[in-house]
Image: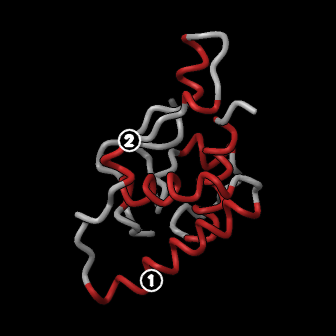
Amino acid sequence: GVGFQGLSTARDVRSEQDQYQESDIVVPQDLLNTSDIVVPEDLQSSNQNYEQMIRAEAEKQGIPQYADQLIAMAKYESQLNPNAKSDKSSASGLFQLTNAAQQDMKVTDPFDPIQNIAGGVGYFKNQIPF
């Protein structure tokens, strides 16, 4: 799907089957266990801030139950580097939003952590079948 560089989205699943449930959205367990990711000490405090910002945005958008998955996705996509840029596509920022996802989510600066987090959480929320 369009949006997140490295992960299949629920929208992809939607085209393959007519009905599915919230439990059908699966984040691989190895993405949820991020303890093996080594982060330089000078980045640890900013990474904790990004995690807090993701949690706050998930709460704001009404999906706090997905905060851990969203943090794992951002770690997987960019190692929580707001300046990350894909070599293979247009994906940029913490959530590696593609140009199409940036447009969909009204993100004008994908390297601005506030905009990228709002766009990444919003894009993810749009994939959830309510």
Q: Say whether residue 29 is left or right of residue 94.
A: left
- Can you identify the residue that label 2 sits on? 6
- Where does residue 63 sit, x and y in percent of width and height? 70, 52
Q: Residues within 10 Å of mark 1 (few under 14, many from 20)?
A: few
Q: Quadrant of the C terminus?
A: top right
Residue picked out by circle 1: 46
Question: Which is nearer the N-term, disc 1 or disc 2?
Answer: 2
Front position in the image: 113 or 40: 40
**What amino acid type should be assigned to the residue bearing mark 1?**
Ser
| Residue beneath the point at 56% across and 71% down | 112
Label 2, residues with CA under 10 Å away: few <14, some 14-19, many ≥20: some
* Residue type beneath disc 2: Gly
Residue 53 x, y percent position in the rendering: 60, 73
* Residue 66, visible in the rendered structure: yes
Q: In terms of secondary structure, where does tag 2 sit?
A: loop
Q: Which mark is residue 82?
A: none
How far across and down, in percent of the image, does residue 49 sit? 52, 80
Note whether 18 is above or below 121 in the view shown.
Answer: above
Identified at 51% across, 74% down, the residue is 50
* Residue 74 relative to residue 29: left or right: right
| Residue at horizontal 31 percent and vertical 43 percent from the top | 88
- Which structural element holds mark 1? helix
Image coords of residue 29 (percent x, y):
35, 44
Callouts 1 and 2 close, C-beta under 8 Å: no
Asked whether 123 or 83 is in front, the reply is 123
Q: Is residue 49 above or below residue 5?
A: below
The residue nearer to you, when weighing 80 against 26, is 26
Q: How many marks?
A: 2
Can see residue 85? Answer: no
Q: Is residue 112 above or below residue 92?
A: below
- Distance from the alpha carbon under mark 1 to that under mark 2: 23 Å
